[in-house]
Image (tube, coloured by chain):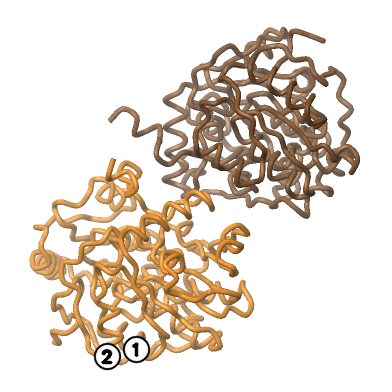
Chain colours: A orange, B brown
């Protein structure tokens, strides 16, 4: 067990190793495996935005993905990679976010049980979404320790297989398929930008660019208030994320033992943005492009708005990670 | 001059006649004329919604159209139908809504002036949008009388040509192209639903179905609180819209002398929905489909949610008319 890598900045070590076996073929197989179940999401462009920023942006819209986020890709790939015997006792995770919904949904595709440990203070919207997708919820105290001990107990009782939200090769390979599609659909991209939390999406993005379109660079965008990936990347020493305060709730977790080395090797740079930029970028995309994206998805565009990424004259792909937003609680209405 | 037909329920008579010359070829020519400038908008579907309502819905997403609404089609067609001499003094209209933006934008394509009369209480967002598109604004008092006398004065001074927001054949032919695209992209539709305000979109929709896919029926959806089209249609006698109170701000106007006869002849039925249904439908589409639609665009889906349109087992197209929403002022946050 290593104490450097964790979900949410604490040690778990469970099922982690530091050697990635994800090859181009792993990603291609994942794409084929999940294609009957997931959406090939549209790629949207805006002439107005391109003119304002003197660039060509291509938004890979995973907000239109099943369960409203790219997480459906990895979860489906992870579940479908298990055989009938392995699936017999179901799968398990602790999550209060999109992974919980994605794993519940993916398990329902093969009639497997999904055991989801959720903190007791999870929003009713998220709890209901997991229930709607057929997840079996066990509530725990809202601490990481309680989440982990409860998950361990659920696994002991059920024999379910843990599916980590990002530190899992089949999860990473599944998330990589979004960028594979982007590369297939848009020629000659110069830059691909993805947000970074635990690094499942980012490492998958980096691997797909590395294998399928190596002339492009991959840039990660992260909130200033959760800049552990920036620090880990620039200092080349793993720094965990400790109690970060950002509205980009998908980006609060620490990197994992599988995702961090991939990111170190294949990502060009990590840039950070302010909270106000995230809100501004989110609202700008809603107003100009008429699509609903969640705060985490606005982080790459916030980096462009802040001038942190030079996109002038370039073809830039952005992974819009999801669109699950509480419509009662919009960040630009907070200060009124 | 006739006193039965008007913008906003009062007489204007200007440039109106009751005989439509809009043929299939008129619509095809409009489609060709505007195609270099407008977006061929995507058609979105949702397996979740289809399962819930036991139907197949196809949303023609004019919220992704230029200026955020189908109005770009008609305005572009109307402006491009004028010759250089006619455009020399520009075009003019009074509008506080999407037509003002659309006409300003369309005029800018050919470097023509767009003179827009707007009531002094128009929202800053709308005023700024018209300015951004290059419209020349003349403010007037917030009464229809002031709008009309001010417009007449602007036209007298400038020699601009009035482009009525819906009671104009080139406008109707332009709006009809949305449904032409829908019919080209989705085979064997059974029903097409459009919202109805002045009837430009609805009459265009009805003509396209009549000419290009006559086996389908066209159903109009309207707010209970602005049910003049329902009354005019069912009673076969024109009833104006008088000071309607609905959040569907695009649907407050009366039918026109050109649009009403087309609707009487080619529309199957008109159904009405409550204000609460409009809000619920709008929010449902935002949450489930991750797209931003304005209240007027939610009216057809509200009719399905209310059970007013039997879509079970049928292929149903819905024209999502636009996505211009004040994000500070969402209807589901009004009662908190």
Q: Position of residue B228 (x, y in %)?
A: 62, 14
- Chain letter of disc 1 in the image: A
Q: Residues within 10 Å of mark 2 (few under 14, many from 20)?
A: few
Q: Secondary structure at mark 1?
A: helix
SS of the residue at dot 2?
loop
Query: Is residue B303 or residue A59 the one in the foreground?
Result: A59
The subunit letter for the residue under badge 2 reads A
Residues marked 1 and 2, same chain: yes
* Residue B58 can be seen in this image: no
Using the numbered discs, state the Cα–Cα distance from disc 1 to disc 2 in whole angstroms.
8 Å
Quadrant of the rendered structure where residue B286 is? top left
Residue at the location (42% across, 25% down)?
Answer: B276
Q: Quadrant of residue B328?
A: top left
* Disc 1 crowd, CA 10 A, few/some/many (<14, 14-19, 20+): some
Residue B246: percent from the left, percent from the top? 49, 22
Query: Is A257 placed above or below B77 here?
Result: below
- Residue B299 sits in quarter: top right
- Seen at 36% across and 55% down, the residue is A279
Q: Are marks 1 and 2 in contact (CB under 8 Å)?
A: yes
Left or right of residue B85: residue B291: left
Residue B168: mark: none
Left-right relation of B151 to A285: right
Quick check: B65 left or right of A237? right
- Where does the image place residue A243, in percent across and percent down from the top left? 16, 67
Locate the C terminus of chain B and report the quarter of the image it occupies. Answer: top left
Give the residue at mark 2: A236
- The numbered mark at residue A264 is 1
Residue at point 35%, 62% (across, down): A296
- The first of marks 1 and 2 along the sequence is 2
Q: Is residue B282 visible?
A: yes
Report the residue at 36% width, 87% height from top.
Answer: A262
Residue B70, given in percent of the width and then of the height, sits at: 66, 40
């Amino acid at each position: 067990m290593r104490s450097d890598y964790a979900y949410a900045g604490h040690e778990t070590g469970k099922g982690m190793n530091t050697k990635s076996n994800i090859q181009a073929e792993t990603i291609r197989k994942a794409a084929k495996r999940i294609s009957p179940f997931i959406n090939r999401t549209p790629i949207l462009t805006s002439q107005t935005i391109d003119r304002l920023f003197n660039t060509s942006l291509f938004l890979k819209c995973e907000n239109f993905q099943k369960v409203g986020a790219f997480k459906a890709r990895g979860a489906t790939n992870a579940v479908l990679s298990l055989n009938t015997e392995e699936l017999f006792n179901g799968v398990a995770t602790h999550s209060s976010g999109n992974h919980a919904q994605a794993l519940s949904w993916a398990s329902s595709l093969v009639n497997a049980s999904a055991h989801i440990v959720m903190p007791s203070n999870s929003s009713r919207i998220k709890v209901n979404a997991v229930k709607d997708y057929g997840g079996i919820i066990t509530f725990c105290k809202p601490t990481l320790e309680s989440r982990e001990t409860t998950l361990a107990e659920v696994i002991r009782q059920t024999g379910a297989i843990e599916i980590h939200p990002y530190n899992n090769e089949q999860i990473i390979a599944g998330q990589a398929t979004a960028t594979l599609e982007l590369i297939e659909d848009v020629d000659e991209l110069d830059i691909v930008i993805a947000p970074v939390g635990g690094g499942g999406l980012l490492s998958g993005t980096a691997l797909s660019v590395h294998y399928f379109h190596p002339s492009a660079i991959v840039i990660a965008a992260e909130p200033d208030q959760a800049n552990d990936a920036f620090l880990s990347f620039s200092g080349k020493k793993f720094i965990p994320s400790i109690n970060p305060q950002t509205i980009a709730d998908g980006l609060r977790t620490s990197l994992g033992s599988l995702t961090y080395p991939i990111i170190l090797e294949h990502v060009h740079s990590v840039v950070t943005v302010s909270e106000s930029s995230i809100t501004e970028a989110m609202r700008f995309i809603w107003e100009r492009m008429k699509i609903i994206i969640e705060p985490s998805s606005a982080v790459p565009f916030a980096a462009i708005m802040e001038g942190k990424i030079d996109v002038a004259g370039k073809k830039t792909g952005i992974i819009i990670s999801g669109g699950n937003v509480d419509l009662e609680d919009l960040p630009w209405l907070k200060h009124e």
